[in-house]
């Protein structure tokens, strides 16, 4: 007669694969999360009735302050003309490989300054240009 041997193996849960899965999920959520980028400049946006604006992640941000200073990203553009704006925008497009422009113009800025930025973008052939506004209160 054959005798049966009892196995005395410890039954347990392997934790190493569980830790791997947790780290993979953590990396996924960190990489796919959206980070809020706040503007340093205080500007008052003009009101608008439309609500079609959807923020884009990969954009070149042009900020026009109340006293008509133009900043592309964090860089102040002194004595801005269409030519200087075209050079700066072209450099940004080449480096960042982005063709979308978002203009954040203060409500008190001159219309001429906004048109200057739009002209420079148009002459470069950049057609994805948005002007940021705030929702108007009725």
Image: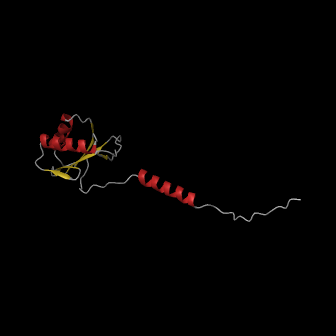
Give how far across and how far down residue 45 sits, in percent: 26, 49
Give how far across and how far down residue 54 sits, in percent: 36, 43
Question: Along the line of sight, which residue is nearer the eye, 62 or 131?
Answer: 62
Q: Quadrant of the C terminus?
A: top left
The quarter of the picture where residue 5 lies is: bottom right
54 is higher (above) or lower (below) than 67: above
54 is higher (above) or lower (below) than 9: above
The quarter of the picture where residue 113 lies is: top left
Q: Quadrant of the N terminus?
A: bottom right
The quarter of the picture where residue 127 lies is: top left
Residue sticking out furthest to the left: 79
In the visual, does 128 lie left or right of 123?
right
Residue shown at the point (24%, 52%) measured from the top left: 44
Residue shown at the point (12%, 40%) measured from the top left: 83
Question: Along the line of sight, which residue is nearer the eye, 17 or 54?
Answer: 17
Give how far across and how far down residue 10 sits, in percent: 69, 65
Residue shown at the point (35%, 54%) measured from the top left: 36
Question: Along the line of sight, which residue is nearer the eye, 58 or 46?
Answer: 58
Question: Along the line of sight, which residue is nearer the eye, 88 or 38?
Answer: 88
Give how far across and how far down residue 26 sits, in percent: 47, 56
């Amino acid at each position: 007669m054959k005798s049966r041997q009892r196995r005395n193996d410890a039954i347990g849960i392997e934790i190493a694969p569980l830790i791997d899965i947790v780290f993979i999920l953590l990396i996924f959520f960190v990489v796919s999360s959206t980070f809020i980028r706040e503007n340093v400049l205080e500007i008052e946006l003009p009101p608008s009735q439309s609500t079609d604006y959807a923020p884009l992640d990969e954009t070149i941000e042009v900020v026009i302050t109340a006293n008509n200073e133009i900043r592309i990203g964090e860089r102040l553009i002194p004595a801005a003309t269409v030519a200087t704006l075209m050079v700066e925008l072209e450099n940004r497009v080449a480096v960042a490989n982005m063709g979308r422009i978002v203009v954040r113009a203060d409500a008190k800025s001159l219309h001429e300054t906004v048109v200057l930025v739009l002209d420079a973008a148009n002459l470069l052939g950049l057609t994805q240009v948005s002007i940021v506004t705030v929702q108007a209160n009725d």
